[in-house]
Image (cartoon, rainbow, N blue to C red):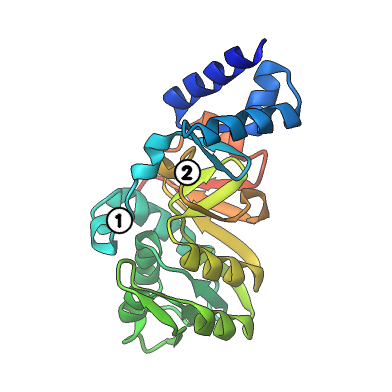
């Protein structure tokens, strides 16, 4: 296949799927890694795509705006509750856990109000859910406040987390695409990465609609999570594909 045909093929794939990886192109066109990267560099220079970690994405994806915490609260509510109830059963009394920001994690916090736990979070909404619990030993990580999500980020938050160790960390994300887990905010992603690195067991809580999608900042590898917990609507095909990377747990229907 000549170069022009390769470039057209890449753009056609992006028009259909929004995202394509270097490995996808190598396997489909039987070309080298270097050839693919040169092709992507040329298309990016011509402003026809944007390169991302391990591949490229359609320019149409750049128009995505970060949703507020309030907007997310009304989306996939049943699925998020299902994930939260399932996840709570994997937490034992007496544990020290980290819970990151996100509406799915807020539902998890509601499940833990009456549990005997030490919970560390950088999420103000999660702190507010748990603050009156008589049995939860609660610690809010401070720092620079992001009103759009209610998360504390920045160097102060990083320094506080760096001195701690967790038995389990529960993290949300905006997107998961093969071995890349991404969120909109680099500052939030950086805190989530640090919390995961300080945890013995690492959990990603994400509903089925976030699979095979992408966002701005990749903060962790799918394969570095011990478990990805999702809702019962995830297809068996997608589950099988991602189980090549990590353990995928589907919550039971309520």
Quadrant into which the N terminus falls: top right
In the displayed structure, 169 sits above or below 40; it is below
For label 1, the SS is: loop
Q: Is residue 183 left or right of residue 1?
A: left
Q: Residue at the spot x=46%, y=69% of the render? A: 100
Pointer 2: what residue?
A: 214
* Image position, residue 163 (x, y; %): 63, 86
Label 1 neighbour load within 10 Å: few <14, some 14-19, many 20+:
few
Judging depth in this view, the residue of 25 and 137 nearest the camera is 25
Q: Residue at the spot x=45%, y=56% of the render? A: 86
Q: How many marks?
A: 2
Judging depth in this view, the residue of 194 and 243 nearest the camera is 194
In the displayed structure, 35 sits above or below 232; it is above
In the displayed structure, 240 sits above or below 174; it is above
* Image position, residue 7 (x, y; %): 57, 20
Q: In the figure, residue 167 lies in which quadrant?
A: bottom right
Alpha carbons under labels 1 and 2: distance apart: 14 Å
Q: Is residue 2 left or right of residue 44?
A: right
Nearer-N-terminus badge (1/2): 1
Judging depth in this view, the residue of 12 and 132 nearest the camera is 12
* Image position, residue 56 (x, y; %): 55, 36
Pointer 1: what residue?
A: 67
For label 2, the SS is: loop
């Amino acid at each position: 296949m000549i170069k022009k045909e390769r470039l057209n093929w890449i753009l056609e794939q992006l028009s259909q799927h929004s995202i394509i990886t270097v490995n996808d192109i190598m396997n489909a066109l039987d070309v080298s890694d270097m050839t693919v990267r040169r092709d992507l560099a040329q298309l990016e220079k011509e402003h026809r795509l944007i390169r991302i970690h391990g591949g490229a994405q359609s320019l149409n994806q750049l128009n995505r705006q970060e949703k507020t915490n309030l907007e997310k609260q009304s989306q996939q509510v049943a699925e998020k509750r299902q994930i939260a109830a399932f996840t709570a059963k994997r937490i034992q009394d007496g544990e020290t856990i980290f819970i990151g920001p996100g509406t799915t994690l807020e539902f998890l916090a509601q499940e833990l109000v009456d549990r005997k736990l030490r919970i560390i979070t950088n999420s103000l909404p999660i702190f507010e859910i748990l603050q009156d619990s008589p049995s939860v030993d609660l610690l809010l990580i401070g720092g620079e406040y992001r009103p759009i999500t209610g998360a504390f980020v920045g160097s102060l938050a990083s320094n506080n987390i760096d001195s701690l160790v967790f038995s389990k960390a529960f993290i949300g994300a905006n997107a998961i695409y093969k071995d890349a887990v991404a969120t909109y905010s680099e500052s939030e992603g950086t805190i989530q990465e640090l919390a995961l690195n300080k945890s013995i067991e690492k959990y990603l809580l994400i509903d089925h609609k976030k699979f095979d999608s992408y966002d701005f900042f990749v903060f962790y590898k799918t394969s570095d999570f011990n478990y990805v917990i999702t809702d019962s609507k995830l297809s068996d095909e997608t589950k099988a594909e991602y189980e090549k990377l990590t353990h995928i747990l589907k919550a039971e229907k309520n």
